[in-house]
Amino acid sequence: MYNKNMSFKIDNLSKTFGNGTKALKNVTMNFQKNKITGLIGFNGSGKTTTFNILANFIEKHEGKFTVDGKPADKNFRKKLSYLAAGAEPKNPIKVIKHFYMIGELYGLSKDMVDEKVKPLAKKMDFTEMLNSPIKSLSKGNQQKIKVISSLLNPNMEYLFLDEPFDGLDPIMVEKIKKIFMDLKNVTIILTSHRMEVVQSMCEEFFVLKEGFLVDSRKTDDNRIFIRVNAEVNIDKILKMEFVQSVKKEKDYTTIIADDIKYFKDVNKELIKSKDYIYSSLRDKNIAESVFKGEDL
Ligand SMILES: Nc1ncnc2c1ncn2[C@@H]1O[C@H](COP(=O)(O)OP(=O)(O)OP(=O)(O)O)[C@@H](O)[C@H]1O
Ligand SMILES: [Mg+2]
């Protein structure tokens, strides 16, 4: 059924490269419209390959990819901006000229490019470098070129960000994060090895491992975990509607409840026993915990 929040959907995506490497194995993911979704995983897990397939840089693959219920086509790609990973090529031309060239591809005049570039350059402490040759800039400053380039498409509704913060200092990361998060009506997919960035920017993230989709999570998971001694009587707690599940092990029982806001109710029952350990996901970096393979 058509779901109006469904932006795009990947169904059973698989990719085997000519040398036999299976980079993606039956990956199915749904991305929500106008949200930022993360794609995380170890080096070589298939993140960039996913982007390259969706952006049509890799044509040969198995599985399908639909946008708002229809197969992705040229029209989708017109609305797509892709900040690809990797270094800028050693380029002798001036930064601003580079932007004019990209603008031309989108049918933008120099004035229109200036109008877009100047406020971004200002926010990114980059104004003075607009007239420098690209190859003379430091790595982080070259990364800013990629960030600005990714924001020049006047038809942008989809934005793929592959390691957009590569080489940037922490203050600049915060500034650029804000630029991306302030975009309106743009559906963003982000890969990053910085888990604090994924946790703070994304509502949801997918985890790839050796080409398989192995997990997907919401970053605002508010569940609470209460571990009690196995002898504690939890009959009353089990009846509480917000208790999601109870895991019984030899020496202890773990109660998993919906939301931290119910903690008091659960706690009232348990306080009598004193013998419990409480933990909450609220303040946890869920992306980092999942990446490290912690049992959440
Ligand atoms: N053109 C290619 N030919 C052969 N194998 C490739 C090619 N491109 C990627 N691969 C392989 O596909 C797998 C997935 O690579 P991919 O670049 O998608 O990983 P990634 O998750 O983006 O990793 P990273 O975090 O290092 O950027 C890896 O095993 C990689 O070596
Ligand atoms: Mg990659």
Image: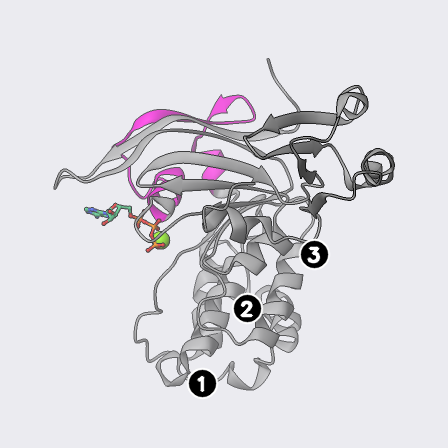
Measure the alpha-carbon separation of dots 1 and 2: 17 Å
Where does residue 203 sit, x and y in percent of width and height?
Answer: 64, 44
Q: Quadrant of the N terminus?
A: top right
Residue, disc 3: 182
Residue 189: in magenta span: no
Q: Pointer 3 and pointer 2: residues touching (CB < 8 Å)?
A: no
- Taking depth in this image into account, of 57 and 130 the one nearest to the observer is 57
Answer yes or no: is residue 249 visible.
yes
Where does residue 2 sit, x and y in percent of width and height?
Answer: 61, 17
Residue 132, numbered circle = 1
Measure the alpha-carbon separation of dots 3 and 2: 25 Å
Q: Is 163 located above or below residue 16 in the figure?
A: below
**How dense is the environment of label 1, judged by Cα within 10 Å: few (below 14), some, or many (20 and up)?**
some
Q: Is 168 located above or below residue 84 in the figure?
A: below
Residue, disc 2: 110
The residue shown at (59%, 43%) is 157
Mark nearest the camera among 3 and 1 is: 3
Compared across the picture, whether 134 is left or right of 6 comes to left
Amino acid at circle 2 = Lys
Q: Secondary structure at mark 2?
A: helix
The residue shown at (41%, 48%) is 41
- Taking depth in this image into account, of 178 and 59 the one nearest to the observer is 178
